Amino acid sequence: MRPERNTMSPIIWGMLFMLLAALGGALVISQASKSRTDLPILWQVPEFEFTERSSQPFGLDDMKGKISVVDFIFTNCQSICPTMSGEMAGLYEYYSESDLVQFVSISVDPARDTLETLNAYAESFGVDDDRWVFLRAPIEEVTRLCEDGFKLPAGDLPMGHSNRFVLVDQNGYIRSYHDSFDQNEIEELKANIRILARSN
Amino acid sequence: MSNFRRFAFLTAIATYLLIFIGGLVRVSGAGLGCPDWPKCFGRWIPPLSINQLPADIDPASFNITLAWIEYFNRLMGMTVGILILITAVLAIKYFRKSPVIMYTSIFAAFLVAFQGWQGGQVVASELEPIIISVHMILALIIVSMLIFVAQQAYYLEKPSEESGVEYPAKIGRDIGILWVAVILQILAGTQVRSQIEIIGARYPLLSDKLVLGMIGWVNYLHIILGVMVIGYTFHIVYKLLGKGRSLPVWIRQAITGMAILMGGQLIIGLILILVGTPELMRVLHLWVASIFLGLLLLLFSAVRHSKGGVDAA
């Protein structure tokens, strides 16, 4: 009996060592995964109904079930908007294989941004499907949604709009804000989208 | 002499643990947990909260969990480095008349120092897949050297250990072929993993299983070669253990270990193909292969050492 026990004991110890390592590894991986999914739930986007450039209504219900990246822009803006929409176009292309992610640009200058103007603006950024929508509504409603819903400054529209992208989850909750001029924040936005997609 | 052998053997085990931890760093996405090197967020001990971050570092880049995973990997790397350095010092002290042991130990110490520097290059390259793969292959070379010196020290201690042992004809050649096949398998596996990462970056929302299906011929090569390696392993195990052959106990243990590892590898491979590519299974897949490689080396050296081994074949 004794020689048999000696023959097997290093193998049993080795297997125990590997089992313990695997258990420790599983714990480390789950903690790392959890640390990346700790995206706070900030605020619920309120109900709204705006008009999309296709003339179709678009509201909170159209955001549910999808991950939305929202920004506020206007087509006559010569300062920050071209950069913002350029970044948004980059994301639109990056997620071209997925219907789960959509992009929502809301005009803060509805007086000049007619549906035709929004159509031309969308086409200038290569938008050829409904994954990137462009919305307009009376300025009072836009201001209310911007300030009360998305918690972004709207005191001096159209010029005073924010350059931030807002990430909204599949249930209509705002999860994070990202400076559209900072590439690190754009990368962080992509990482957060991946987290939300995995929790789908 | 036996203390050296035990020390080198324990250092090899610690190195295997480090290889496992390195794999964990990769799959848990902690490779850039510390964005600088050798410090972590400009500190020798990583920050415990966002308030401890230096003013010039973007708080968005800080994840305390990932920082500490990477930091633990570096601490473990430093510990293994010191253990290998001690192994080299002991080899210089006790094995001046055995140049193979002494120079292999010294070379391992130089290689581990280079490996430490190369770990910094992994961070500097922002996790370039080829540089990560070089880091892993260097680790395999280092651990092979440690196993080799421990075994050679054992033979100096017990010179007649393998004498009179009759290994099957041409078994040394078989083990050599299997060793090369496993190395090729590991290289193909690193390519599969790189492709997973590249495709995952291009199509970030695809499931791992779909990504695996998009890899193409490298993946199929890896699977086919894997099946051949499993078959060849059990062929060798049968040749060695069959017909009541009389082998030293530790050789029988190594052969049994090889069979168990290969069985485990078969299960892990099936999980990777059928379930997707769960992170833990990816780490275990490579880790089991690296331990298997060590056992093969052990067996190959034993066969070469015996009079009736490769020479007779």
Image (cartoon, helix red, strand yellow):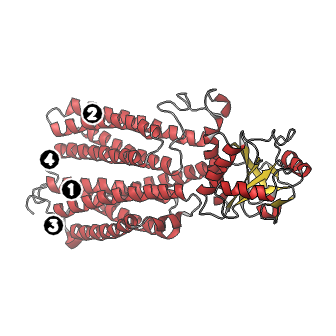
Q: Is residue A177 left or right of residue B259?
A: right
Is disc 4 in the same subunit as disc 1?
A: yes
Q: Could you tell me residue B173's position as x and y percent?
A: 17, 62
Amino acid type of the residue that numbered disc 4 sits on in the rendered structure? Pro
Query: SS class of the residue under badge 1?
Result: helix
At label 3, counting other C-alpha atoms closer than 10 Å, the crowd grade (few under 14, some 14-19, many 20 or more) is some
Secondary structure category for the residue under label 3: loop
Find numbered disc 2 in the image and state the secondary structure of the residue it sits on: helix
Which residue in the structure is indicated by mark 4? B159
Q: For residue A128, what is the image quadrant?
A: bottom right
Q: Amino acid at mark 1?
A: Phe
Q: Chain of mark 2?
A: B
Q: Residue at x 54, y 54 (%)?
A: A26
Say which residue label 3 marks.
Answer: B168
Specify the farthest residue to the right.
A140
User: Left of B291 or right of it: where is A43?
Assistant: right
Q: Is residue B162 above or below residue B234?
A: above
Mark 3 belongs to chain: B
Residue type at mark 2: give it.
Answer: Ala
Q: Secondary structure at mark 4?
A: loop
The residues bearing labels 4 and 1 have C-alpha atoms spaced at a distance of 17 Å
| First of labels 2, 3 by sequence position | 2
Please provide percent x and percent y for residue A10. 35, 55
Residue at which label 2 appears: B88
In the rendered structure, the residue with mark 1 lies on which chain?
B
Disc 3 from disc 1: Cα separation: 13 Å
Q: Residue at x 9, y 63 (%)?
A: B313
Q: Quadrant of residue B100?
A: top left
